[in-house]
Structures are given as C-alpha cells and as structure tokens.
Image: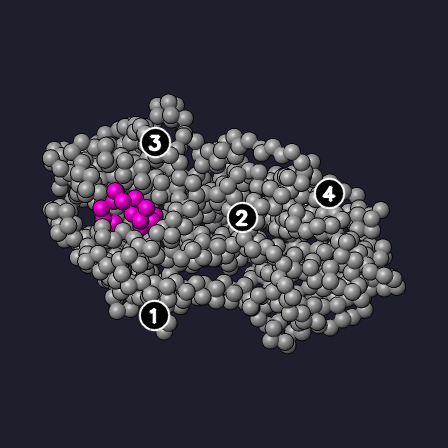
Amino acid sequence: MRCLFLSFALSAVAADFAAVKPNVFPADDPRAKELPRMMLNDVKERMRAASLRESQAFAAVQSRAQWEAYREPRLKALRESLGEFPPVPANMRIVPTGKIEGDGFVIHNLLYETRPHFWVSANLYLPVKPPEKMPGVLLSHSHHNPKTEGELQDMGMTWARAGVAVLVPDHLGHGERRQHDFRTEKDYPKPFRVSRQDYYFRYNTNLQLSLCGESLMGWMVWDLMRGVDVLLKQPNIDSSRIILLGAVAGGGDPAGVTAALDSRIACVAPFNFGGWQPESGGTDNPDRDFAWFGDGYWESTRGLKSGARDGFAHFVIVGSVAPRKLIYSHEFTWDEKRDPAWPRLQKIFGFYDAKDSLRTAFGAGSVRNSGPGNTHCNNIGAVHRAMIYPALKAWFDMPVPQEYKQRRTTAELTCWTDKARAELEPKKLHEVLKARLEALQPQPFDTRKAEIDYLRREWTKLLGNIEPVHEPKLFKGLSEEVAGGKLSRFALDVEPGIVVPFLLIEPTNEKGKLPVVVMVAQGGKAGFLKERAEEIEAFLKAGVAVCLVDVRGTGETKAGASAERGSTRTSISQTHLILGQPLLGAQLRDLRTVLAWLRMSETIDGQHIGLWGDSFAPANADELAMMHPFDAPELPRVAEPNGAALAVLAGLFEENIAGVFTHGGLLANSSILMSPYFYVPHEAIVPCASGDRDISTLVQFAVQPQKHSCGVLGWNQTFSEQKHPPTNASGWMIERVKGK
C-alpha cells in the first residue's frame, strides 16, 4: 500500500509548484551539464589522487627496512578493514561425511566449522599412499562455479595421484553454501540464469556482513585460513609446503589477501589479482591512472573498503608475501612491459634477494574475445597449470604430474547429508548475523546527554568527516515569485568538483527572521515540488520558509535513476567505501553545510529549524513475494530510505533542531538480516559493528520531538504500524518550528 500524505486533490496553487523548474543552473550553463557527471568525476579524481600519492610513496622506498616500514601499517589497515577475526579455534570440528575411491587417490567429503554453527563444505583429495612428506594445496575457486567444477576436480585428482593433499572448499555463498533458494530452473516460474545466482547474491551477502562491520572478503579469508588448518591436520603433511592457488574471476582476490595475512602459506598464485586485470588497458600515467585499488564494482572483493585511503594497493597485498613464493598469474595474454605492477613486485622481491621466488603464469587471447586460442577458463586451465608445475618443481621438489581427468558428479561430491544436517544444525548467514546482533547488550548510560555524546562519537567513527564546510563558495541563481512566496536558487561549492544545489522559498509579507523546514530526499528538489506541493504551500501560508536541498548524489546531481546491484549509484557508493568514507557521511556533511549557511542568513531564524527526510519511492505491496533471482524480470521496487536517515543524523549532530519528520525511512537496518532477500540501495548500508549504531536507535534518542510516516523494512514493505500516515504532518512541523 502506498502511503499518501493527504487524501484531498492538489489545489491549483499547490499545482503551481510542480511546474517550477527545480534546477539551480540554467540549462545552457556548462555547470548544469556537469552535474549528472559530478559524482563519477569526483570519485575518479579522488581515486587518481590516492593512486598518485601511493605511487610516490612507494617510489621513495629504497631498502628492505623502508619497505617493511611501508608495508606494516598497510597490512594492519587491510586486516582491520576486513572485520573482526574470531579467535582461532583450538580444536576445530572436522566432520567427514563421505568417501570416494579413485585410481591412486581418494576423495573425502567433509565439513569444517569456522564459526559457531557456520560450516564450510569441502572435498579433500589425498593420495592412496601418501609420501613421507606431503605438500598441501588449497584451491580458492572462482565466482563461476563451486568446488565441484571440472578444472578443480582435475587439479585435485592430478595432484593427489602425484602425492599431494588438495583441499577444495566452497566459498561462502557458493555451491553447498549458497544463501539463496534458486538451485535449478524449477525454483522460479520465469526465466533466469541459474548458474549465476551464487555470484549475484554475493552482493546481498556482502551488504549483510557490512551491516555488522564485517566483509565478504574477510569471511572468505578466514575460511581459507581454516582450510590451511585442515591440511595441516593430515598425516605426513609438510607444513613448509602449503600452496594456495586462487582461480580466475574472483578466486585470486581472497587467495592474495589470505597469503598476505597468513605466513603459513609458502606459495600463492592469485590469478588476476595484484596488478594487471583482464580488462586493463594502457595508460600514459599509470602511477595515477592504473586501478591500483580495484574499482567500485558491486563485487566487493575486488575493491576493498578503505584501500585507497589507507594505501593497501593490490600490488602491496600480493608483494607482502615476499620472500615467500609468488606466481603472478593471469588468465589471458600478459605483457610484462605493459603491466605497471610487475616492476614494483620485482623491486619488492629484490629487497630480499629473492627474485627467483617470483614467477609468472599466463594464457593467451583476451577477455573481450572468445575465438580459438583464447585461454578463458572456469578456474585454472590446463594451459595455466602447465606454467605452474615447473615453479612448484623448482621451489618445492613437487614432480610435474601427468594430467588426469575422470570427473565425478556433483551428487558424489556433495558433503551435506541428512544425517549431518540433523546433527550439526547449520545456520544460514543471515541467521548467524541476526543472532549476533540480538546477543549484544545495550550500553547503559547515566544521562541522556551521555547517550547522545556516545552516539555522536560512534557515528562519527562510522561516517568520517561530517563537519560543515567552513565558508563554502556561494552561487546565486535566478529568483522568481511563486504562489505565496519567493523562490531563490543557490548552490554551494563544498569541495573541489562538488556542488550542492538548493532552493530557498520564503513566504511573502512576513516580518522578522523566518523559521525554516529543510527537506531532503533521493528524488531531490524536483521530487518535493512535484510530490509535496501541498506541504510546501502549507508552510508558506504559516509563515515558514522551505529549503529543498540536493545533497551530492541526489536530485539534479544524481548519477542515474537505478539503485540496482549493477547501477552507477552502486559503483559510486562502493568507490566511496574504497576511499574510506560511506557516501551517507559525505551527504550528511553537505546537509550540515547548508544548515550552517541558513543559520548565517539574514532572513532565517537559525534557532527554529525543522528537518524533513523523505522518500518518493513506492513501497512493495504486502502480497508481493520477496524471493526472486537477481536477474528475474520485474524485480521488487527498491526503497529510498536515505532522506530519512540524513534528517535523523542531522538531528543528532545539530543543536537546536525544532523537530524531525521522516517518511519512507528504513525502520531498522537490521531488518535486512531477516532473509537473503532485501531491496535497499547500496549506500543505505553503513558499515557498522554493533546494533546500537542502527539508525533506528537514533529515532528514539537523537532529537525530540520526532514523527515518522510509512517506514519500511529491508524488503521495502511498509511496517504494519505505520501504514497510515500521521494526519497533517505539515501542521505538526509548523507547530514545532514556530515554537507552539
């Protein structure tokens, strides 16, 4: 059911507001043409600046001591960005559930518990007759397929027959660890890509983890570390010969990070991670323009949170294994002269006189072509393995094996049995995270002031720099008379390349300084003029000014209409995380800058300000099913809760706010932990560490009074107790700002 503020038809006067041109700059002004590109240009320039800064810092490193001094704080920051690793289990439970006899090898289907009630399914390939000292290989599979994929089986069987232990686990979200319900085409009535759902749902999985201060990369890395434990428990294993191979298409990312943080790994081959990517191209200034920190793609393991801010470029992560062994690996053609990361890796290994510990493996062709000769693979192809074998022979005296291919069915390699499920009671990710939040005890406070101070400190840690910009440059555009008032157009330059446009509508025939209601929403000024014309009219009639603000990424500065997984908005939000600040934090700084400007205005009463956070996105109908594949036609609508979040947060940090009204806000961020399915924008989830930092707690404690309408839950359905909007929300706000 869509919430409506008032049931009566728009009056002729109110309708005039919908006809007002909301843009601050004239259509032929170059600045107007730049606004839709503003957000992309901004993150691009800031990523360039971070790349150049770190390139210059690394260029100054000229010795092993300097490298280690450069490396250590970046590895520390990397580890902190991943979330909180739990204590290493003293006696990790490993449960065998099946066994397959092969020609010179045996496959054990097993489960190992990396967190309470959270299990990894894995296939362990062992020689029938293990040698006295046996190397161990851990395979990190791609996002294409889980542990049962053919190339993974080939490697497991081939190496086991040659006297090597090989462990192939399912990554979180894949195979037997998938978090969604779409295993076959029969699981949904309309066409969808069955094979891609594990990959697509990594988006939701990471957002759920991010809500709890964790990351998908962090959980993958932890699981791989515990996979090393499994290998080390095998009889005759040689602890000095543990090798981690990270497959193409996302398998190399966690392999590279795991090896950097776990010194037990003697050798790593992180395909397509550390430097040159299949999509990479040449650049005249690689120090500045190469994607050293990945990019803001929705796939979060490639663009790591705070990587650009804290300097842990991918080559730094991979280079940190020196002087251990590194096979710098690429799926397609690789030219060492074009790859700017290669000389940096050589420089690092040179500090240890260990250049022989650095080898390469690569294929042929290009990701953009599919013709003959292209070495596209699902994990690690035979062409690539042929280049890996000699390195392992030279370093670890592992024989070059004869390739073996007798693939088994998925059913044969399945680890979870009915008996195991009944005994082990495994949990889904959202269940584990939900129980974790529910177990947190609220922090007691002696006074309300102490609680407010705590919330301000904690949210500042999460949001970054949210302080208003001092003396921003002001642009004043055209003004015009509107029904009941005068509309003036303004914009503030808050940062290089970032402009915050806003409208100030002041009632006519009023004396003295005016109270004001500041309104913010994803739909921006245009949305308010179209959808809230009656409320604006009511404010003006009551002698209250109205300020409509387009904080960055909203209104005329929005970077696209869609908030879906692969949208430009998602990419920009993820890039903000790579740069070290959630987009919501930067938007809050914009809003507070406008509030500071209003308080200095000669016509506005800075002691009588109301905040109105809104959403114009319709909620999903109650009867609409929430379970959908990611590429299904006609997906549920996505909520737009950040207008409400900004109003509440501004109410927390700003003094003397007369009242806060929200419409369409997310009632509790934790509601996205109710199931694997939710429909909120990427920027709505601020990486948090505990439930007491939820926006919903600010609803109770930030400012008084507050009023809320049509709040939504994570699947963008209206909460039952808020289906009916409050009567006369504008009247309520008028009473607040006029001090009645």
Q: Nearer the viewer, residue 451 or 690?
A: 451
As measured in the structure, the alpha-carbon distance from the residue carrying label 3 to the one carrying label 2 is 30 Å
Q: Residue at x 38, y 49 (%)?
A: 76
Which mark, residue 461? 2
The answer to whether residue 119 is left or right of residue 714 is left
- Binning the other alpha carbons within 10 Å of mark 4 as few (below 14), some (14 to 19) or many (20 upward) gives some
Q: Earlier in the sequence, mark 3 or mark 4?
A: 3
* Nearest-to-viewer mark from 1 and 4: 4
Give how far across and how far down residue 159 sits, in percent: 17, 43
Mark 3 near mark 2, Cβ–Cβ under 8 Å? no
Q: Is residue 695 visible?
A: no
Q: Which residues are magenta?
A: 254-268
Which mark, residue 704? 4
The answer to whether residue 701 is left or right of residue 194 is right
The answer to whether residue 438 is left or right of residue 698 is left
Give how far across and how far down residue 586 sits, in percent: 57, 57
Q: Residue at x 85, y 46 (%)?
A: 740
Identity of the amino acid at label 3? Pro
Which mark, residue 89? 3
Asked which secondary structure carries label 2, the reply is helix
Identity of the amino acid at label 1? Gly
Q: Nearer the viewer, residue 414 or 86?
A: 86
* Nearest-to-viewer mark from 2 and 4: 2
User: What colour scheme has been applied to the protein in the rendered image?
Assistant: one colour
Is 256 covered by the magenta stretch?
A: yes
Q: Earlier in the sequence, mark 1 or mark 4?
A: 1
Q: Earlier in the sequence, mark 1 or mark 3?
A: 3
- Binning the other alpha carbons within 10 Å of mark 2 as few (below 14), some (14 to 19) or many (20 upward) gives few
Q: Earlier in the sequence, mark 3 or mark 2?
A: 3
As measured in the structure, the alpha-carbon distance from the residue carrying label 1 to the one carrying label 3 is 46 Å
